[in-house]
Image (cartoon, rainbow, N blue to C red):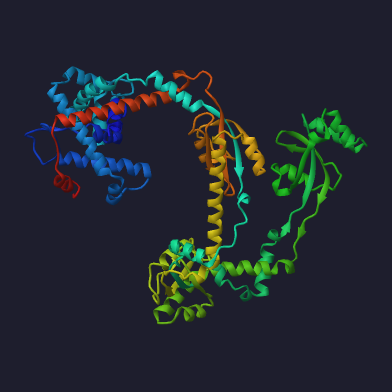
């Protein structure tokens, strides 16, 4: 209860920033009013009272804080579910008790000290790092607080802090406790174990009819049939109304001619380039090439390898330098270009490989174009089809009649439950907007035209419920095969668990695990360096927990994480961590433990104060405070 109170008391001044100031004020700085104050009191602790207005202020700020955490406005009903009303009440009761104790102890704060605390608050500092009255007024104005309200509540916080610090300031977790934590977390163990598979008790003999019927009666609810509904729906998306047959050959050819580049793989060239320090050097090299010198020799003379000068294989549009692109795509394969003024110097280019452009013929892409054009048209007219379908239904036509007019398909699901399974237990994966469709279909009645569901930004599902099969108990004859399967699996599990218990007892009573393993035809396995809280692949989380739940040389049984087996184990070694002690616990964790102990002390203080000062809670006043 006092966690937030103590935290606010220790950091209230540092966190006094704009709206967050109001949040801290609401939780920690709500002032109790001494008897004789004006207004209805929701809490009284001795002669200290908290008004309904103060309760509502703290309540609203708590909701604001929670809304900011969730990124959405928390409703009154959600706040009640979170217990916000009781949290605020507990905080205000604790604050009122501390105020009453401070009053009894005649604790106070001088005006000079109050001024110093206010001046120390960084929220009120100007650009020079000192207290600025204009900044003080601005911050309080943004928080909706008058200066006198701030000063009154700042004084109250400081007085409360005197009590809090007297109880918990400087408290540290004891070294003995920290060493115990270090030992607990750092310990590792060695475990020997046997994994008992189901094959030790299988095959299970075929049960009699009486046995199966008795099992069925004991577990009848597990075999009950859920409510099933017969649902018909019409899906309307662009793909559902696209009609490629309506696109003529001429339209497709016209589109092909206008967008020929879409169906053409551009020419690609493998380009090599040599960059020279000057245009004169490039021209001298070009003259040598024209006189018979190999391009490779020119490259070597520049101190480069052929890998160094390989630019790559590109389409013309992908060559970043336009001058290089124009030159490279204007020479023949194997030729060297004229000098090209590149971005980083004068360049000579050579093209060593050319992959010609390839255009897909119209006949090859004709259907693809028609499909695309039909889909574009479907997007354009989808709302018209939607409205026409709705008009037909409004005119009294059935779903089938309205769908037929728009050349839409009616799909009927004969039986489906709320989870989307058919009577055979198969999940229906092809239902459009499955979760929403099923949720809505199980909330409506038969024969009702329901509002359509939306699919993305351009799509609809029209649906109706044609029939309802109420939930019922199935007969034994309907589910006999399933009952037999379940009984056999349960019997195998029960027998294996009994076998594991028998095996564990034998080892616990002193029989060597090696002898037990030999009798069962199993192999002893060893797990070393096992750490607490680990999720071991062979033992699983529960197996690790069980191994750390017994002493050295003790035994145990746990279910195997895979394939329904049983594990019988024995803890053979326990190792304490090297250097276990208080210093082995990280500082942030030591601080966390200290905070927890301090909070416990503060909780005890408040509990004792509740016995010292009579506390009354005016629930009608709280209800009234929350009603406006």
Q: Picture quarter containing residue 109?
A: top left
Q: Where does the image place residue 58, in percent across and percent down from the top left? A: 23, 39
Locate residue 351, reporting x and y percent. 82, 44
**Quadrant holding the N terminus:** top left
Q: Is residue 81 above or below residue 387?
A: above
Q: Is residue 84 left or right of residue 301?
A: left
Q: Nearer the viewer, residue 203 or 391?
A: 203
View extreme (left): residue: 36
Q: Nearer the viewer, residue 563 or 250?
A: 563
Looking at the picture, tell me which residue is in the foreground, 328 or 461.
461
Describe residue 596's horizontal placement relative to residue 401 as left or right.
left
Direction from residue 95 to residue 303 in the image, left or right: right
Residue 257 coordinates in the image, percent (x, y):
69, 65
Q: Using the rendered view, name the quadrant where residue 502 is placed.
A: top right
Examine the rendered structure and indicate whether residue 102 appears above or below residue 492.
Answer: above
Q: What residue is at 16 percent from the left and 21 percent from the top?
A: 108
Where does residue 91 sit, x and y in percent of width and height? 24, 35
The reply to whether residue 49 is in sight is: no
Residue appearing at x 75%, y 65% in the figure: 361
User: Farthest residue in the right direction?
Assistant: 292
Can residue 206 be spotted in the picture?
A: yes
Q: Quadrant of residue 66?
A: top left
Total marks placed: 0
Where 446 sits versus 202, above or below? below
């Amino acid at each position: 209860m006092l966690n937030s109170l103590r935290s606010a008391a220790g950091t209230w001044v540092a966190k006094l920033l704009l709206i967050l100031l109001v949040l801290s004020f609401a939780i920690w700085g709500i002032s109790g009013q001494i008897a004789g104050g004006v207004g209805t009191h929701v809490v009284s602790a001795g002669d200290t009272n908290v008004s309904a207005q103060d309760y509502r202020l703290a309540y609203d700020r708590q909701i604001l804080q929670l809304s900011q955490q969730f990124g959405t406005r928390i409703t009154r009903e959600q706040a009640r579910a979170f217990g916000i009303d009781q949290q605020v009440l507990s905080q205000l009761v604790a604050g009122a008790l501390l105020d009453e104790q401070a009053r009894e102890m005649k604790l106070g704060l001088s005006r000079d000290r109050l001024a110093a605390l206010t001046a120390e608050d960084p929220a009120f500092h100007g650009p020079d790092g000192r207290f600025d009255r204009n900044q003080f007024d601005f911050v309080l104005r943004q928080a909706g607080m008058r200066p006198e309200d701030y000063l009154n509540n700042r004084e109250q916080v400081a007085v409360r802090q005197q009590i809090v610090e007297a109880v918990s300031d400087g408290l540290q977790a004891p070294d003995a406790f920290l060493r115990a934590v270090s030992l607990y977390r750092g310990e590792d163990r060695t475990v020997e174990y046997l994994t008992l598979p189901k094959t030790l008790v299988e095959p299970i003999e075929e049960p009699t009819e009486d046995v199966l019927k008795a099992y069925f009666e004991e577990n009848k609810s597990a075999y009950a049939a859920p409510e099933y509904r017969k649902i018909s729906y019409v899906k309307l998306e662009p793909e559902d109304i696209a009609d490629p047959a309506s696109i003529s050959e001429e339209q497709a050819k016209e589109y092909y001619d206008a967008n020929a580049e879409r169906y053409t793989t551009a020419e690609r060239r493998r380009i090599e380039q040599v960059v020279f320090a000057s245009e004169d050097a490039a021209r001298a090299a070009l003259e040598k090439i024209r006189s018979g010198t190999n391009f490779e020799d020119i490259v070597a003379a520049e101190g480069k390898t052929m890998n160094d000068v390989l630019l790559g294989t590109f389409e013309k549009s992908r060559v970043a330098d336009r001058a290089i692109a124009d030159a490279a795509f204007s020479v023949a394969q194997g030729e060297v270009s004229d000098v090209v003024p590149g971005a980083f110097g004068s360049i000579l280019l050579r093209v060593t490989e050319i992959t010609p452009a390839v255009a897909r013929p119209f006949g090859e892409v004709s259907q693809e174009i028609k499909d695309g054009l039909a889909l574009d048209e479907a997007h354009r007219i989808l709302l018209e089809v939607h409205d026409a379908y709705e008009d037909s239904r409004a005119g009294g036509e059935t779903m089938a009649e309205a769908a037929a007019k728009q050349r839409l398909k009616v799909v009927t699901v004969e039986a489906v439950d709320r989870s989307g399974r058919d009577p055979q237990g198969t999940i229906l994966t092809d239902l459009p907007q499955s979760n929403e469709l099923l949720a809505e279909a199980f909330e409506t009645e038969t024969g009702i035209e329901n509002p359509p569901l939306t699919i993305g930004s351009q799509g609809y599902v029209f649906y109706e419920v044609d029939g309802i099969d109420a939930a019922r108990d199935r007969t034994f004859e309907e589910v006999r095969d399933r009952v037999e399967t379940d009984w056999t699996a349960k019997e195998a599990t029960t027998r294996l668990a009994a076998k594991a218990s028998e095996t564990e007892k034998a080892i616990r009573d002193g029989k060597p695990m090696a002898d037990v393993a030999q009798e069962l035809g199993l192999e002893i396995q060893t797990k070393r360096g096992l750490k607490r809280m680990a999720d071991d692949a062979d033992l699983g989380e529960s197996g690790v927990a069980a191994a750390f739940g017994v002493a050295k040389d003790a035994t145990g049984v746990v279910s195997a994480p895979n394939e329904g087996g049983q594990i019988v184990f024995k803890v053979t070694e326990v190792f304490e961590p090297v250097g276990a002690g208080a210093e082995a616990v990280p500082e942030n964790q030591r601080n966390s433990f200290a905070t927890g102990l301090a909070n416990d002390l503060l909780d005890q203080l408040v509990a004792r104060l509740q016995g010292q000062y009579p506390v009354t809670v005016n629930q009608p006043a709280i209800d009234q405070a929350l009603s406006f």
